Image (cartoon, rainbow, N blue to C red):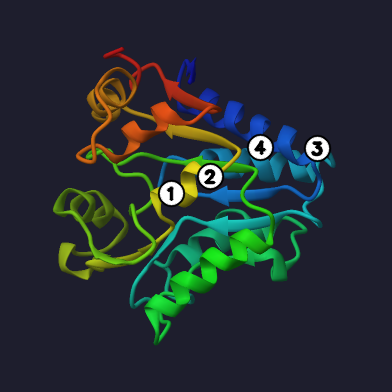
């Protein structure tokens, strides 16, 4: 596990974008696993800037997102489909057929999860998986199934909604096993509120109570932190 500490969020975002751009440059048909939430927004903005400067090309890139809220239409401004379109996809020349995001309105959720996993396998697996981390140590929403979200996660995600009771209580998520099969993983964390979780993830025991701790077993993980998130290390 390699730890990189950036001065602040802006530097964290630039370093992340540069790593993603390097992956695309070295392998134009890369399969990228992408995350949502507030932490990767800056990296996506910087990645769009690099694209507009003519340094990378998305035409062969294939993407798989970690998760989606269960019950939200993709046109809903709070859906992760909408998030990805607004923050990355509509600003670059990616082939829309190469974008994969779980369908939160699927009638047969179990089938949706199985088919999503099969699409990842058919694509040859994920070359680089981008992760955020929750205050409770979750990565993605943990399992490729419909789950009730942790109250801490609901509270954290409520900042994107007008009221707490509007936050969906279920989500479809890529599972830990699939994440661990990624060839390379980049985990991002920003802010002092993540510092204790980051310390436990890196220096604590591997436990289901802190799902991100399993990354200690992965052979190629980069943990990218700003100074506040790294202050407990």
User: Which class describes the residues within 10 Å of circle 1: few (<14), some (14-19), or many (20+)?
Assistant: few
| Residue at 24 percent of width and 56 percent of height | 158
Q: Which label's residue is closer to the chain start, 1 or 4? A: 4
Residue at image mark 4: 20
| Lateral position of residue 163 relative to residue 230, left or right | left
Rounded to the nearest whole Å, what is the CA distance between mark 4 and mark 2?
18 Å
Between circles 4 and 2, the one closer to the viewer is: 2
Q: How many numbered marks does the figure carry?
A: 4
Rounded to the nearest whole Å, what is the CA distance between mark 1 and mark 4?
22 Å
Rounded to the nearest whole Å, what is the CA distance between mark 1 and mark 2?
6 Å
User: Which class describes the residues within 10 Å of circle 4: few (<14), some (14-19), or many (20+)?
Assistant: many
Rounded to the nearest whole Å, what is the CA distance between mark 2 and mark 3?
22 Å
Residue at image mark 2: 181
CB of mark 1 within 8 Å of CB of mark 4? no
User: Which class describes the residues within 10 Å of circle 3: few (<14), some (14-19), or many (20+)?
Assistant: some
Which residue is more in the foreground, 134 or 93?
Answer: 134
Between circles 1 and 4, the one closer to the viewer is: 1
Task: Where is residue 184? Give x, y as percent.
Answer: 59, 35
Residue at image mark 3: 25
Q: Which label's residue is closer to the chain start, 2 or 3? A: 3
Identify the element where label 2 is drawn: loop
| Lateral position of residue 195 relative to residue 209, left or right | right
Rounded to the nearest whole Å, what is the CA distance between mark 1 and mark 3?
27 Å
Residue at image mark 1: 177
Q: Which label's residue is closer to the chain start, 4 or 3? A: 4
Considering only vertical position in the picture, is 159 above or below 2?
Answer: below
CB of mark 4 within 8 Å of CB of mark 3? no
Q: Which label's residue is closer to the chain start, 4 or 2? A: 4
Identify the element where label 3 is drawn: helix
| Lateral position of residue 213 relative to residue 148, left or right | right
CB of mark 1 within 8 Å of CB of mark 2? yes
Rounded to the nearest whole Å, what is the CA distance between mark 4 and mark 3?
9 Å
């Amino acid at each position: 596990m390699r730890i990189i500490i950036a001065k602040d969020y802006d530097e964290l975002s630039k370093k992340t974008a540069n790593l993603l751009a390097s992956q695309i440059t070295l392998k134009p048909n890369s399969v990228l696993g992408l995350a949502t939430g507030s932490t990767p927004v800056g990296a996506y903005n910087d990645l769009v800037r690099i694209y507009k400067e003519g340094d990378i090309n998305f035409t062969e890139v294939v993407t798989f997102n970690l998760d989606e809220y269960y019950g939200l239409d993709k046109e809903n401004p709070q859906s992760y489909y909408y998030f990805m379109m607004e923050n990355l996809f509509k600003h670059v020349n990616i082939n829309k057929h190469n974008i994969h995001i779980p369908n939160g309105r699927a009638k047969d959720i179990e089938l949706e999860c199985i088919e999503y996993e099969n699409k990842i396998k058919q694509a040859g697996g994920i070359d680089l998986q981008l992760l955020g981390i929750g205050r409770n140590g979750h990565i993605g929403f943990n399992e490729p199934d419909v789950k009730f979200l942790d109250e801490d996660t609901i509270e954290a995600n409520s900042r994107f909604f007008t009221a707490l009771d509007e936050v969906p209580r279920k989500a479809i998520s890529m599972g830990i096993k699939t994440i661990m099969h990624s060839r390379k993983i980049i985990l991002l964390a920003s802010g002092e509120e993540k510092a204790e979780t980051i310390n436990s993830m890196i220096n604590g025991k591997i436990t289901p109570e802190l799902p991100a701790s399993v990354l200690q077993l992965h052979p190629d993980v980069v943990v990218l932190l700003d100074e506040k998130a790294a202050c407990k290390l």
